[in-house]
Image: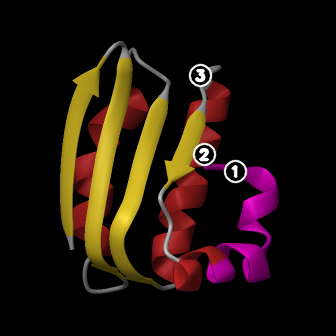
């Protein structure tokens, strides 16, 4: 799993690639933690290169969504591959997150 984070036009952009599972979720959570406490509540997560997500990865997306909501921001998840989007659809995450 690789995570790249940058700020552009007042929005935080995070690009995640590889596998987001129990082996990599701790690293993902540590890298995302400053964003959940920072002043900018608007986050966009680009999943174009995300190959796999497990339940631990889904839990982290839910944590991010809750943090963004609590701070009055917006979370957008973009560029999902079909197999990742199918997982979000089956688990109901598509109904609680903005997926572009």
Magenta region, residue range:
86-100
User: Crowding near pointer 2: few (<14 within 10 Å), some, many (20+)?
Assistant: many
User: Crowding near pointer 3: few (<14 within 10 Å), some, many (20+)?
Assistant: some
Which secondary structure dominates the residues rendered in magenta?
Answer: helix
Please, is residue 81 above or below residue 12 in the view? below
Q: Which is more N-terminal, label 3 or label 1? A: 3
Please tell me whether residue 81 belongs to the stretch shown in magenta: no
Is 76 left or right of 10, judged from the image as shown? right
Q: Which is more N-terminal, label 3 or label 2? A: 2
Q: Which mark is residue 65?
A: 2
> Residue beneath label 3, please?
71
Rendered location of residue 87, percent (x, y): 64, 82
Q: Quadrant of the N terminus?
A: bottom left
Of tags 1 and 2, the one toward the viewer is 1
> Residue beneath label 1, please?
97
Q: Nearer the viewer, residue 75 or 32?
A: 75
Q: Residue at x 35, y 73 (%)?
A: 50
Residue 92 in which image quadrant:
bottom right
Q: Residue at x 38, y 28 (%)?
A: 37
């Amino acid at each position: 799993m690789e995570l790249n984070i940058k700020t552009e036009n007042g929005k935080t952009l995070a690009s995640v690639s590889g596998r987001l599972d129990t082996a990599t979720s701790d690293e993902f959570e540590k890298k995302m933690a400053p964003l959940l406490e920072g002043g900018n509540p608007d986050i966009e997560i680009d999943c174009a290169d995300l190959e796999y997500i497990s339940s631990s990865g889904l839990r982290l997306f839910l944590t991010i969504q809750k943090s963004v909501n609590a701070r009055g921001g917006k979370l957008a998840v973009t560029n999902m591959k079909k197999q990742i989007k199918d997982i979000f659809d089956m688990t109901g995450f598509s109904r609680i997150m903005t997926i572009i």
